[in-house]
Amino acid sequence: MKNSTNGVLLVSRLLPQTIAGRLASYGYSCFPLCGSPELTTELGFHPDILLCRLPDGSWITDSGVLAANRMLFDSLGMSVRTADVKLGDSYPNDVPFNAFFSGNILYCSKHTAQEIRNSAGNAVIFRQGYVKCSILALGNDSFITSDCGIARVLQKKGANVLLIRPGYIGLNGFSCGFIGGASAMLNDNIAVFFGDLRLHPDCSRIKSFLSELQIDAVSLSGEPLYDYGGLLHVVRYGNSNYMPGKQQ
């Protein structure tokens, strides 16, 4: 087993224990989030729907999520505040926090909570509201997505983008899930996948793309890929926060 102090991960309450156990073998402790009382689908348990981390290491969510998870957040020493907007059960009311920072750049949509957009010096804005769901951010201005519109915007910005086929990722209640919710960067050199990457038709292309970036692909189970809403890093190597593209 690897160093047991690598960090803390916020994960979906629906994440199988077998996958949490695999993450633990890399030295990460998984803490499942209580879901949003406003959402009736599995999205209500997805970390990338419930929270967004700001560049200063603080977090933003809505009042219902904060109330449901206050004890957990306090126990982890997280600084969490609420936005004026509340999560809702239909799009685009479910995406105000589905954005992310890579380095100092915010990747978001017009539906992203204003408090998040106000915290960004630079922003890349997409039409697609499920921004974090749709993108696996690898650092070094490199990304994987199945969304053609997102890929075009990123490529126009000069980013290194792998466009994969949509689908082949499960999500109950939806036609399919997304690559950003079915995977995550565990650290700068390991990308983990919630399922068996070999079962995705673009497995070889994904592995080759990652290899060029000196990133290992790790499948966390033998099942088809499934969208659990990614994972969120709280602590990495002591008290520092991991963010793809952030200089450590």
Image (spheres, helix red, strand yellow):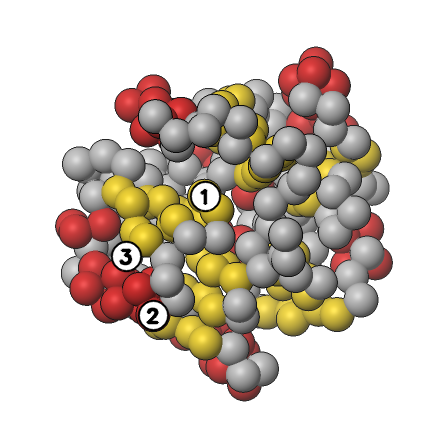
The spot of residue 14 in percent (x, y) is 40, 25
- Does residue 199 lie above or below 87 as drawn? below
Residue at 21%, 59% in the rendered image: 203
Amino acid on which the number 1 mark rests in the picture: Leu
Could you tell me which quadrant the N terminus lies in?
Answer: top left
The spot of residue 118 in percent (x, y) is 83, 58
Going from N to C along the chain, the mark reached first, 3 or 2, is 3
- Look at discs 3 and 2 and give the one toward the viewer: 2
Task: Give the residue pinned by disc 2.
Answer: 212
- Does residue 162 lie above or below 132 as drawn? below
| Residues at marks 1 and 3, CA–CA distance in whole angstroms | 23 Å
Label 1: how many residues lie within 10 Å, few (<14), some (14-19) or many (20+)?
A: many
SS at mark 1?
A: strand
Residue at 57%, 21% in the rendered image: 34
Task: Give the residue pinned by disc 3.
Answer: 167
Q: In this rendering, would 6 be left or right of 165? A: right
Residue 9 in sight: no
Residue 119 in sight: yes
Q: How many marks?
A: 3
The image quadrant that residue 147 belongs to is bottom left
The spot of residue 178 in percent (x, y) is 39, 52
Amino acid on which the number 3 mark rests in the picture: Gly
| Residues at marks 2 and 1, CA–CA distance in whole angstroms | 17 Å
Q: In this rendering, would 174 be left or right of 153? A: left
Going from N to C along the chain, the mark reached first, 1 or 3, is 3
Residue 186 badge: 1
Amino acid on which the number 2 mark rests in the picture: Glu
Going from N to C along the chain, the mark reached first, 2 or 1, is 1
| Residues at marks 3 and 2, CA–CA distance in whole angstroms | 24 Å
